[in-house]
Structure formats: structure tokens, C-alpha cells
Image (cartoon, grey):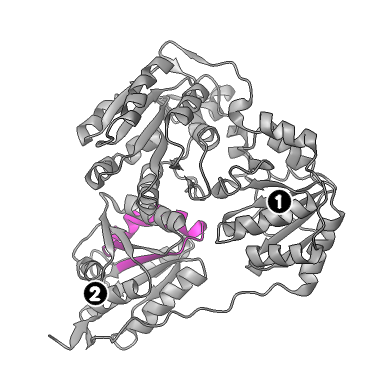
């Protein structure tokens, strides 16, 4: 057995040794050796049909597993194909390692400034520069991804890949900087605000999805009488809690919006309180005290003015504030009337509506309520971008914060199917549900084969209005021509059947009998639902989507 190895082989083994156990990608000559090295070291490799899909699968897997994932791509074009998915991950602060081969010669057809590409989309560019430093550079990259919650582009130049070094004795130690410690002054100020609030609301975001956060926030909320809400990416965090308002912001139900607006104290826990979560600030009452808790000082007050900010970990800060409050428990916002209203009206499906449709079209609300009842409750839902997206996001319940994967920081159409694949692999005990528009379904259609090849028992539901519906409803009322955003009707179910799905076309509730049959059956093939939805009016959240972007 040789006592030496190549940089490519050492880097692949080191990444796995540092905890990166799943890698997605499309393998070419430049990333062949390092990808095989990761597999040999015990990682699972998931082959996608396009690098863009692979990037989003890796992003979703990291979000739903709470473990770093890797994306492996060829030099140059492999990376540029992946950039939209990498941008989404970077904007979402997903701990993701993008392992990209890099052309060594500036005259190569594959030569591009990969570090500049990474920096331009918000990722952190790093590079393996030599055999002697390779392991330390791997450890630094993993540490930046995991502890800095960053998407890291780790460039691996072709000429460095073939350099040799002694076989390492083990994986390098990953540097872990000490986390912030919430100060007594901050805890006292937060506890004072909670003590004097009569209608407090907690809004939990991505930073509140860690171990113990739900329990800590619920215990603190009980002591001060706070209602509980989340940003979209944390949907499901308070599922089952009788004081939960579900999602705050553009997706909020009328009752949820009313109760958040009525708060005299709003505390964002690991939540940016951005324009989506706060409806451009309109959900915050004029005289409300606004507090943001985040372990990153630079995140405080970025999207809106604060009364004050607290630097600290969500769980530890909530526990410290609860200890400061003592065993007191006040009613606060938790009155019998509010509890009754939440039970009766906080869910969108409990808001009365007059179904649209007719002429072979089903109302998207009717469709989604029926699917919510038909599909198993243990599910993980992934939603693409488009006019339709509010319906699956708010009418499909999820069991917890690992039941909803929302890759929408970059608002790109076409990521939904790949998101569902990555989420499904991270949560194998749940039914994966991909909710797409027809535009996104066709953009991501290459990965239909991946669903079938991996044997995923997935439900893909397409809200098919034969258009880019957001643009139709945004520009149509002003009299603009819409030929550029409308398309002929497409038999999407037939396309899916060609890949190996069970394909169903739904035009009315009666057509959903085929969905019930699939749920009761063996589910050996995934299910594709081409739902021809009514498109008479925009989704309720659409006005928010076109403000200030």
C-alpha cells in the first residue's frame, strides 16, 4: 500500500473526515478524482442531471439535515451552471461546500475567475494552493461553512490536484471560534421589555431552528404571554402550539396579520424582520417596541430600525431571559378570546372563499386543501417560486420546522423540484411534496429522471396556468401585452410518465381520486399531478412580492 496520495484524494477524504457526508454534483474530468475520493471515504454521492439542480439539492439537504453538504462541479462551465443555486445558498447562509475544479492555465477554454464569481454572488472564495497546506485549507473551509454559516467555494486547481503528499493519519481539526455570550445587560433589557409588554409577539426565523430553540422560546413565551409566529423559512417551528400564528408576513392569514400588527412588543429571534416577514414594516404597530436577537452583530437592524438589539444565541438568550423573569406567568396576549380566534381562524383553510374555476380549471385553494387532507401528515414540502406559491406554503400543514424547505432568498423560478430531492434525502422518513408552477416544472424537468432513479416516493404537484402567472397578474391590469408570458397548454403529466412517474391530470376535485389511490397503494413510482388551476385572479401575496424588489 502506497504511503503517499494525491491532493485530490486527500481533499476528498478530509472533507468526509470533517463531517461532510453527502455530496451532490455532475462529475466531469476536473472533479472526477476528488468526488471518487469522497465516495471511497464513505460519503454518499447523488448524481444530478444539471449542476443547477445539484446545487439546490445540496442546499436543501443541508437545511433539512442540519449538516453541511457538498456540491462537486467541473471547472468553468460546471460552476457557472450551478451559480443560481449557489447564489440561493449564499443568500440563505447555508453551510455548503462548493468543491470546484479550477483551470490552471489562463488559456484554457474552462478558465474563468471563479473566485470573483463566488464573491459576486455572496459566497466565500477559498482555494487549495499546495500539497503542504491542503488539509489546513480544507479544515478552514469547513469551519467557515459550518461555524460561519456560509456557502464556501473551495477551488481545486488542476495542477495542484495531482501533487502528492504523505497519506494523512486522520482528518484535520476544524477550527471553531467561540460563540457570542449574551451579556447580563442585554438580558436585563430584554427581560424588562417582556415584563412591561401587554401584547408581545415572538417571530422566529432561520436562526431559531437549532436544537432546544423551540422549547426555550415556548417556555419564555408562556411566562410573558407572547404569541408565536415564524418567518417563512422557519414554518412549522411551533406546529401544534395553540398560540401559534404560523407564518408572519406576506403569507400571514388575516387574523395572524391583525394580531402581529396589534403587538406592543415584537421580538425577532434569529429572524431578519425583513420586508417579507414584516410586510415592508406595515405589520409593526407605530408605537411597538422592536427587538432583534441574533448571534451575528452585523445582522442587527439591517432591515429596519430597532428599539434595541441583543447579540446572542437564540436558545441561550431565551433561557437567560426566562431565568430573569422568574416563575411569573402573565396572560399578556394570551386571552381566551385570542385563543378561540386562533383555533377558529388562523389557518388559511378556515378563511371563507368563493371557489374560482369552471371550464376544466380547479381553484388552487380547493386543490391544496384537498391535498392537505389526502397526503400523509409526515411530509416535507418544497415550494418553487411563482404566483401559485402562497397556496402550498400556507394550505399544506407541516409537522415541524424540518417539514418545510423554502429556497426563496433569490426568488428564482425553477429550484423547487431540486429542493424537494435534497429535502427528501435529508428526511427519508417523510413524504416529499414538490409544489411547482408550470414554468418552474419545465425549467427543472431534467431532475424528474433523478427522482425516479433514486426511488423517491415523491408527490410533484404543478399549479398549471400555462403562464408565468406573476407577470400576467402584475402587468395585465395595466393593459400590457402578455404574449411573452403566456404559453400553449402542455400535457405535463405525459412528460412525467415518460420519466417513470404515475401521471395524473386534475381539472376538478373528482380527479383527485387517483391521488387517493396512489396514497393507499405501494408508491413504488412517484406521483405527478398536473393541476390545471384557475388563473382569474392573483394570489393574495402577489402585491407584496412586487413591492421594493
Examine the rendered structure and indicate whether residue 199 appears above or below residue 518: below
x, y percentage for residue 377?
A: 46, 37
Residue at image coords 73%, 52%: 221
Residue sitting at the far right: 196
x, y percentage for residue 205?
A: 61, 53
Residue 86 on the magenta span = yes
Question: What is the CA distance from the residue labelled 2 to the residue labelled 1?
Answer: 50 Å
Disc on res. 368: none
For label 2, the crowd category at 10 Å Cα-Cα, with few meaning under 14, some 14 to 19 and many 20 or more, is many
Q: Is residue 405 left or right of residue 269?
A: left
Secondary element at tag 1: strand
The answer to whether any part of residue 179 appears in the image is yes
Examine the rendered structure and indicate whether residue 243 appears above or below residue 492: below
Residue sitting at the far top: 359
The answer to whether any part of residue 488 appears in the image is no
What span is in magenta?
72-100
Residue 322 on the magenta span = no
Disc on res. 158: 2
Residue at image coords 46%, 56%: 63
For label 1, the crowd category at 10 Å Cα-Cα, with few meaning under 14, some 14 to 19 and many 20 or more, is many
Q: Is residue 362 left or right of residue 506?
A: right
Secondary element at tag 2: helix
x, y percentage for residue 296?
A: 63, 68
Q: Is residue 341 left or right of residue 109?
A: right
Q: Earlier in the sequence, mark 2 or mark 1?
A: 2
Residue labelled with disc 1 = 202
Query: What is the quadrant of residue 444 in the picture?
Result: top left
Where, quadrant-wise, is the C terminus in this rendering? top right
Residue at image coords 66%, 59%: 216
Residue in the foreground of this view, choosing between 17 and 323? 323
Examine the rendered structure and indicate whether residue 514 appears above or below residue 99: above
Amino acid at each position: 500500500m502506497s504511503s503517499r496520495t494525491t491532493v485530490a484524494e486527500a481533499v476528498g477524504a478530509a472533507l468526509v473526515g470533517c463531517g461532510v457526508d453527502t455530496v451532490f454534483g455532475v462529475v466531469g474530468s476536473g472533479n472526477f478524482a476528488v468526488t471518487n475520493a469522497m465516495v471511497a471515504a464513505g460519503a454518499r454521492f447523488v448524481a444530478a442531471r444539471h449542476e443547477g439542480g445539484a446545487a439546490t439539492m445540496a442546499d436543501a439537504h443541508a437545511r433539512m439535515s442540519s449538516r453541511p453538504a457538498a456540491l462537486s462541479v467541473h471547472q468553468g462551465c460546471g460552476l457557472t451552471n450551478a451559480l443560481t443555486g449557489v447564489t440561493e445558498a449564499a443568500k440563505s447562509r447555508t453551510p455548503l461546500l462548493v468543491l470546484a475544479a479550477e483551470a490552471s492555465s489562463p488559456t484554457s477554454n474552462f478558465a474563468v475567475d471563479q473566485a470573483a464569481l463566488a464573491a459576486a454572488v455572496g459566497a466565500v472564495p477559498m482555494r487549495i494552493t499546495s500539497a503542504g497546506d491542503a488539509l489546513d485549507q480544507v479544515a478552514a473551509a469547513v469551519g467557515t461553512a459550518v461555524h460561519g454559516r456560509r456557502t464556501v467555494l473551495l477551488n481545486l486547481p488542476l495542477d495542484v490536484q495531482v501533487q502528492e503528499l504523505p497519506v494523512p493519519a486522520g482528518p484535520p481539526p476544524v477550527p471553531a471560534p467561540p460563540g457570542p455570550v449574551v451579556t447580563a445587560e442585554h438580558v436585563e433589557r430584554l427581560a424588562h421589555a417582556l415584563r412591561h409588554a401587554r401584547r408581545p409577539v415572538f417571530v422566529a426565523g432561520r436562526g431559531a431552528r437549532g436544537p432546544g430553540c423551540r422549547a426555550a422560546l415556548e417556555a419564555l413565551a408562556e411566562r410573558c404571554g407572547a404569541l408565536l409566529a415564524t418567518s417563512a423559512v422557519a414554518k412549522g417551528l411551533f406546529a401544534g402550539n395553540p398560540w401559534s400564528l404560523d407564518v408572519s408576513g406576506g403569507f400571514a392569514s388575516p387574523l395572524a396579520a391583525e394580531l402581529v400588527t396589534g403587538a406592543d412588543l415584537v421580538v425577532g429571534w434569529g429572524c431578519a424582520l425583513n420586508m417579507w416577514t414584516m410586510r415592508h414594516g406595515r405589520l409593526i404597530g407605530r408605537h411597538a417596541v422592536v427587538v432583534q436577537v441574533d448571534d451575528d452583530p452585523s445582522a442587527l437592524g439591517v432591515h429596519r430600525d430597532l428599539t434595541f438589539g441583543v447579540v446572542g444565541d437564540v436558545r441561550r438568550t431565551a433561557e437567560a431571559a426566562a431565568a430573569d423573569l422568574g416563575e411569573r406567568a402573565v396572560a399578556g396576549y394570551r386571552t381566551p378570546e385570542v385563543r378561540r380566534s386562533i383555533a377558529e381562524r388562523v389557518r388559511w383553510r378556515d378563511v371563507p372563499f368563493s371557489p374560482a374555476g369552471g371550464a376544466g380549471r380547479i381553484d388552487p385553494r380547493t386543490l391544496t386543501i384537498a391535498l392537505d387532507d389526502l397526503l400523509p401528515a409526515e411530509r416535507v414540502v418544497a415550494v418553487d417560486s411563482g404566483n401559485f406559491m402562497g397556496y402550498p406554503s400556507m394550505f399544506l400543514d407541516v409537522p415541524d420546522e424540518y417539514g418545510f424547505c423554502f429556497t426563496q432568498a433569490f426568488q428564482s423560478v425553477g429550484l423547487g423540484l431540486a429542493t424537494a430531492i435534497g429535502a427528501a434525502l435529508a428526511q427519508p422518513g417523510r413524504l416529499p411534496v414538490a409544489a411547482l408552477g408550470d414554468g418552474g416544472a419545465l425549467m427543472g424537468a431534467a431532475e424528474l429522471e433523478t427522482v425516479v432513479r433514486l426511488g423517491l416516493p415523491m408527490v410533484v404537484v404543478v399549479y398549471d396556468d400555462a403562464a408565468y402567472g406573476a407577470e400576467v397578474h402584475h402587468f395585465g391590469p395595466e393593459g400590457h401585452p402578455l404574449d411573452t408570458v403566456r404559453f400553449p397548454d402542455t400535457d405535463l403529466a405525459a412528460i412525467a410518465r415518460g420519466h417513470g412517474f404515475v401521471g395524473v391530470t386534475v381539472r376538478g376535485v373528482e380527479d383527485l381520486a387517483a391521488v387517493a389511490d396512489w396514497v393507499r397503494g405501494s408508491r413504488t413510482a412517484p406521483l405527478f399531478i398536473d393541476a390545471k388551476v384557475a388563473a382569474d385572479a392573483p394570489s393574495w401575496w402577489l402585491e407584496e412580492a412586487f413591492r421594493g424588489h
